[in-house]
Amino acid sequence: MERINHMEYMEGMETIPEDIMEEVIARMEAYDYDRYTEADVRRALDSNPLAPEGFAALLSPAAMPFLEDMAKRAREETRKHFGNSVYIFTPIYISNYCENHCVYCGFNCHNRIRRVKLDLDRIEAEMKAISETGLEEILILTGESPAMSDVAYIGEACKIARRYFRMVGLEIYPVNTEEYAYLHDCGADFVTVFQETYNSEKYETLHLAGRKRIFPYRFHAQERALRGGMRGVAFAALLGLDDCRKDAFATGMHAHLIQRKYPHAEISISCPRLCPIINNDRINPKDVHEAQLLQVITAYRIFLPFANITISTRERAAFRDNVIGMAATKISAGVSTGIGGHGGEEGEQGDDQFEISDRRTVDQVYDAIREKGLQPVMNEYVYV
């Protein structure tokens, strides 16, 4: 089957100026991390603020012997800008129907899994159950199927969420500016989009069909969300799909340039590693080791000191507990990546998107944060 050009927009996809994408891709392609030396790393650690060139040095192999120094600097930046607070949230998956063929994702349209879309009553039951744990922030996720989970349906989910939570985030398929504006009016505060990999050639081989195949449309999602009125946006590459150093560098640069262009925007970074998925045992989460992940997280913190950094349940509990307070400022708890998995109203449940490693409850994560001398926070924003 002939595949569509992954760099050409489909009908109905909004285009915006591509200056940021061009700069990010050019810098990533020029990034030769093997050229950095011990002296470059030391110079970067002494720099404040850290320039992109210093960020590149901290992501290089030459920085690996300096992980302890990077952790110390990251902790200093975290305490300076966030104090000892760690924010807790949970995701809720409301549908796992998907129209994309992404070879690494459990929801891909050719994977034979149990597909479920929660109706509005079940969404409310799930959200009520989550809110009873004390959480005040929710992240709404769907599979990428505008046919099965259209913007109106997601908007209704946002309206329900606003009744139970102070903060409502979205991790859905990219949409146009006016659709982000509508979802913002429905109650959404921020938008998360994983670019997956910033290597467009690798991206083309991983996304075989569907709207997600269009690389530039996905790249510009955060900018369209901000134009639509969203208060904040989150960025991530799925580390392990391609060269993780280059993808981490591109992610940081993307966030940095958006922050510079939209100084009012609240910026967040996620640091997910590839995880095993249902019906595919070839997905290997050990392609990026924990030491390298720690390097990426601490480099993000030093380069983007004001950004929230999220550590997800893809990682072991011990690793997550180690990085909160050091560099990560947001942590998920009581997580289910399946559909209808939060103990609300009984009904059919859909299969998980990927395997998680930390299955602790909200109370258990809360207690773990307190044991580290940190302050668990359920809400990072107050409306007046």
Image (cartoon, helix red, strand yellow):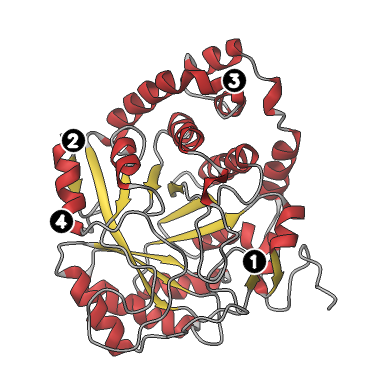
Residue type at mark 1 is Val
Real-space CA distance between mark 1 and mark 4, rounded to the nearest whole angstrom: 35 Å
Crowding around mark 2 (Cα neighbors within 10 Å: few <14, some 14 to 19, many 20+) is few
- Point out which mark residue 103 bears: 1
Name the residue that disc number 4 marks: 363
**How far across and how far down the image is residue 145, in percent?**
55, 80
Q: Quadrant of the N terminus?
A: bottom right
Q: Quadrant of residue 318?
A: top left
- Point out which mark residue 84 bears: none
Residue type at mark 3 is Ala
Real-space CA distance between mark 1 and mark 3, rounded to the nearest whole angstrom: 33 Å
- The secondary element bearing badge 2 is classed as loop
- The secondary element bearing badge 4 is classed as helix
- The secondary element bearing badge 1 is classed as loop
- Front-most of residues 377 and 12: 377
Residue at image coords 32%, 32%: 326
- The secondary element bearing badge 3 is classed as helix
Q: Earlier in the sequence, mark 2 or mark 4?
A: 4
- Front-most of residues 162 and 226: 162
Name the residue that disc number 2 marks: 372
Residue type at mark 4 is Asp
Name the residue that disc number 3 marks: 62
